[in-house]
Image (cartoon, rainbow, N blue to C red):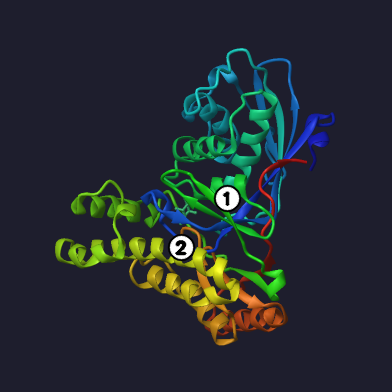
Amino acid sequence: MTFQQVYGYEPAVQYSAPGRVNLIGEHTDYNDGYVLPFAIDRRTTASIAPREDRVLRVASAFDTDNPPVSLSLDELAPDRMDGWSAYVLGIAWALREQAGADLSDKTGFDVFIESDVPVGAGLSSSAAIECGVALAFNDLWELGLDRKSLARVGQYSENHAVGAPTGIMDQSASLLGEQDAVVFLDCRTLDTAVVDLALEANGLEVLVVDTRVEHAHATGGYKARRDSCERGAAAMGVEALRDLSVDDLHRAQELLDDETFRRVRHVVTEDQRVLDTVRTLREHGPRAIGSLLVASHESMRDDFEISVPELDLAVTTAMEHGAVGARMTGGGFGGAAIALVDQEARGAIADAVTAAFAAAGYREPNVFTVHAAQGARRD
Ligand code: GLA
């Protein structure tokens, strides 16, 4: 399916935006903390043509059974959007609601979405749609918003139009990513620094193991974890867990119930691991970050309790077969793990993980390499 086949004419412009892998810093974003994601070389493309009326029409290559969804700019509201089209329509709504854009004199668009970001793998296929569309609408409507503002728009749409209570990490990675680098983001201030990954120069690669175990953010444990973190911060008398350091954990243990304490300990130590990873990358390069990645995984498995047996098996098998480091990535409860591996070891590690899954009776994982790529752009 193409834009031409759906709408009967050629698109005027094409924008694309990547999915992301988070190197480290999990469930820290909505705690005002630190994250270290990178945009990957898997992208979503939005082909677009302006219309003369105020209608937005949306179609996609993964929903070819249905006609395009169409909605007037005068009818934008979350309860008028459902299914995947909310990822597109919600952006127009959020540009108005969250960023205060005046859409009263704007015309609509025909939009066609294609993607090679695997859906449901925890690689932010949804943020890729949101960010490509946000950049496109911002340009074509001449709204003049910068990329950090567009990340906020994407997050607002995800929270209120799509209905998933997620943080700012995915949209920031998709909009701010750069080739062969990670985005060090302070989720409170949105201050960013681009940190060299230098994988190629060090003979390394990042392997993704998509377990193909479904993760369900909105209905699953994501919200429960978020609630625990808010309770923990309130009990500790701080605005967000970001305001605690490792030295505060002793007091936290005395004050909090065991479960809330372990949630808090994950977030506080994970923030510290992000800072340590940035420093280590800068001073010693990517080969030195392995133990931080593994410690992050163990903290998510034991304290935050968001891993699943398939993710644990991917991590332990990769480590047993010589990976430099490995951890689950993204929201958890399924999705993907990453392993930092020597280029020459990639095939053997991928085979070992696939064999271990077969031996355990798990569904065959999807194993592939990703590279840190440029963020959203006009193609
Ligand atoms: C999901 C959310 C992000 C972040 C991660 C966990 O990917 O969309 O905002 O909270 O989970 O780090």
Q: In the displayed orientation, state which residue is furthest to the top.
A: 105
User: Counting residues from the N terminus, which is met first, the one under dot 1 or under dot 2?
Assistant: 1
Residue reaching furthest front?
283
Where residue 310 appears, as percent x and y from the top left, is: 50, 73
Residue marked by disc 1: 173
Q: Which mark is residue 274?
A: 2
Report the amino acid beneath label 2.
Answer: Val
Q: Badge 2 local density, few (<14 within 10 Å), some, or many (20+)?
A: many
Q: Nearer the viewer, residue 239 or 137?
A: 239
Q: Look at 64% across and 57% down and name the residue there.
A: 118
Q: Quadrant of the C terminus?
A: top right
Q: Is residue 135 left or right of residue 188?
A: right
Q: In the rendering, at what x and y percent does residue 323 appear?
A: 59, 80
Asked if disc 1 and disc 2 are in contact, CB closer than 8 Å, the reply is no
- Label 2's element? helix
- Mark closer to the observer (1, 2): 2
For residue 102, side relative to residue 345 (left or right): left
- Asked if ligand 1 lies within 8 A of label 2, the reply is no
Residue at left offset 57%, top offset 52%? 124
The quadrant of the rendering that contains the N terminus is top right
